[in-house]
Image: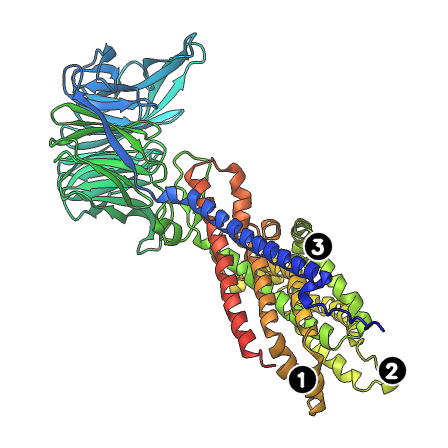
Amino acid sequence: MNAVTQPKKLKAGDNPLYKTRALKEKLAKHFIGIGGVSVIIAILLIFFYLLYSVVPMFGAAEVHLDNSYQMPGEGRTLHIGIEELGTIAVRVTDTADVIFFDSKTGDILSHEQLDTPPITAVASINDQVLLGFEDGTALALQYKFIADYDDNDQRNLTPEIHYPLGEQPVTITETGDALKLLSFSITDDSAGIAAVTENDEVVFARYLREQSFISESITTELDNRDVYAMDKPVQNIELAPNFNYLYVASVDDEVLQFDLGYGGFKREPFIIKMPEKITAMRLLLGGSSLLVGLQTGEVQQWMQVRDTDEQGDEFRTLTYIRNFDSTSSAITGIRSEQRRKGFVVGDEQGQVTIYYATSQRTLAQMSPGDAAITELAWSARAQHLLTVDDNETVYLFEVDNEYPEVSWDVLWGKVWYEGYDEPDYIWQSSASTNDFEPKLSLVPLSFGTIKAALYAMLFAVPIAILGAIYTAQFMAPRMRQTVKPSIEIMEALPTVILGFLAGLWLAPLVEEELASIFALLLLLPPGFLLSAWLYRYVPRRYNMDGWEGMLLVPVVFLLMWLSTVIAHPIEDAFFDGNLRNYMTEVWGIGYDQRNSLVVGLIMGFAVIPTIFSIAEDALFSVPQHLIRGSLALGATRWQTLMWVVLPAASPAIFSALMMGFGRAVGETMIVLMATGNTPVMDMSIFEGMRTLSANIAVEVPEAEVGSTHYRVLFLAALVLFLFTFIFNTMAEVVRQRLRQRYSAL
């Protein structure tokens, strides 16, 4: 009889199903790991790209000497200039010779000898030069470079001289005294000239200019003239571009501010004492700031600031703003850039220093020679700098200075900008004028971002968390199957639609029914409590266990109707019929239609599904044996909720809050359309704001690629990135600690 063969036992590893499952788990593990690492790499790439775009802003200016040579031509240099691309320079001498020469080699290209009386004074503004003569007259010149292209697309420049006040000199003084100092400003239809005569009389003359449409000739006619006799010699004068102020520096340490009107000097001058002897003076681009160079090598910036006299009358006077001190020798010359708030100074030891006013940065410092600097000139793009020293030696510098406007103080500190009465945090990146001073503080944008998220969370968190608690622990299953998906579907609503509704429907509604909204906020809590108290007396056979939330729907609509009914009589009785005007006129609280209240309501509505969904899942997933054990030990449902359910679900609830906050911080379209986009720092719920994300969305399309504005917007994106990273990291740390604390449950 054959023995019965026993079946061979298979080990777990020999089972084909086990091998397939193990292979799938291994592949899934590797794919999940690769996916996680890929996400981290993508985030790091974004971070480094933003950093790559931001870092160039904080580099120093690069300046190198291109060439030096002896000034071409004869005579003493009164003025030098250089064309936009730095290829041709111009020189005006004391013999009235205008010489155009190659800026790199010094070779003379052309020159024109003017037939004028002996020159005794000179003033210049970029490509305009005013020559003053010993007979009390003055002649204005403007040199231009006309570009054309030959058959080989080679750019050729032809220098020309124009006369913006006519080819004949204009009379400055009635007495014919020689002019010692000059300053001027020319507009489309007028011109202002300030002069100091050899007798130290200050003369201000206003002229009307008209250009013929046929011959294009210019005629100039004296409009008015006024004279002020000084009691001490004058060192320098500067006339504001719009003829409203004249600054006169004495030979010692005083600057006199003359207020000018249509007829001339309006009143006695304000006298400003400087700490040291004044050696140079120049208006910054736009004429709002006065740069004063001192004997000690310090340059001070002074600006017109509003003040009030003893009678309560307002006036504007020069106020010290900031100083620049990188040299120890007396300042001999100051020249402003033609398109930015930068300037260059030269001293008596031959040192040349480049500064930027707004950022208070010393950008570069050069010492090409040891003779005093007498003349300085910027090209229009500030890429070339021409200097002349006391030995008539010319130095041509190439300048790479793309981002002088940026510093730590500009981005994060209070800065005293032109036209403002005190330092402040301001964002204003562009304007319609060429002499605009960019204001690039990220503080109001960061403040607006946090403010918008805060008000959204104030609205969303109570509703989302309490709604999640009720849905997960008290709501009937059939009702939960309808409510939860409905709220989660809300998250799919496009935020641009929500922003559109907020700006065009909700904001006007809130403005019109402001009193009703406040009445509703006051009526809701007692209305809910009253409803709960009345529900206690409902017979048990009508008890709607788990469906109580349905009963509150008509209560909410009833309270909304009641708030509109009682709001208007209250508004008429206590707030003169208009709550908004009353707040503004009596309480001093401004009201913008697109404000934080509107943003809080609509963005809170957008954030609720995120917080609700995660929190509800966490609460519903609390093990039932914990809940039943607590109830079995005699705890009520509320006690079980407070001491068992909420602690067990607290890590996920905290994560829900942080995810909701991150969503609010990064929101773009809602805040773009519903905030008014005003970069103000005011916590008032009735004022708007501008957030980092909205600012990026608005201004990136209009920013020039590679410009300071463009890179600051990338910095704003980097700050927003760091905001979310820091908050998420903090949330993860807190979540892990909560998980460890309540893991025993």
26 and 695: which is toward the camera: 26
- Give coordinates of residue 432: x percent, y percent: 46, 36
Please indicate, yes or no, whether residue 686 appears anywhere in the rendered image. no
Q: Amino acid at mark 1?
A: Thr
Give the residue furthest to the bottom: 634
Compute the Cα span from label 2 to label 3: 37 Å
The quadrant the C terminus occupies is bottom right
* Precedes in sequence: disc 1 or disc 2: 2
The quadrant the N terminus occupies is bottom right
Report if the CB atoms under discs 1 and 2 are less than 8 Å apart. Answer: no
Please rate how many residues cluster around mark 2, counting C-alpha atoms within 10 Å: few if below 14, some from 14 to 19, many from 20.
few
Camera-nearest label, 1 or 2: 1
Taking the image as shown, residue 600 lies to the left or right of residue 551, namely left
**Residue linked to disc 1:** 640
Taking the image as shown, residue 670 lies to the left or right of residue 82, namely right
265 and 437: which is toward the camera: 437
Residue at x-position 83% and y-position 85%: 538
Please rate how many residues cluster around mark 3, counting C-alpha atoms within 10 Å: few if below 14, some from 14 to 19, many from 20.
few
Please indicate, yes or no, whether residue 232 appears anywhere in the rendered image. yes
**Residue linked to disc 3:** 492
Number of numbered discs: 3
Res 542 label: 2
- Give coordinates of residue 259: x percent, y percent: 30, 40
Q: Secondary structure at mark 3?
A: loop
Q: Amino acid at mark 3?
A: Ala
Q: Amino acid at mark 2?
A: Tyr
Please rate how many residues cluster around mark 1, counting C-alpha atoms within 10 Å: few if below 14, some from 14 to 19, many from 20.
some
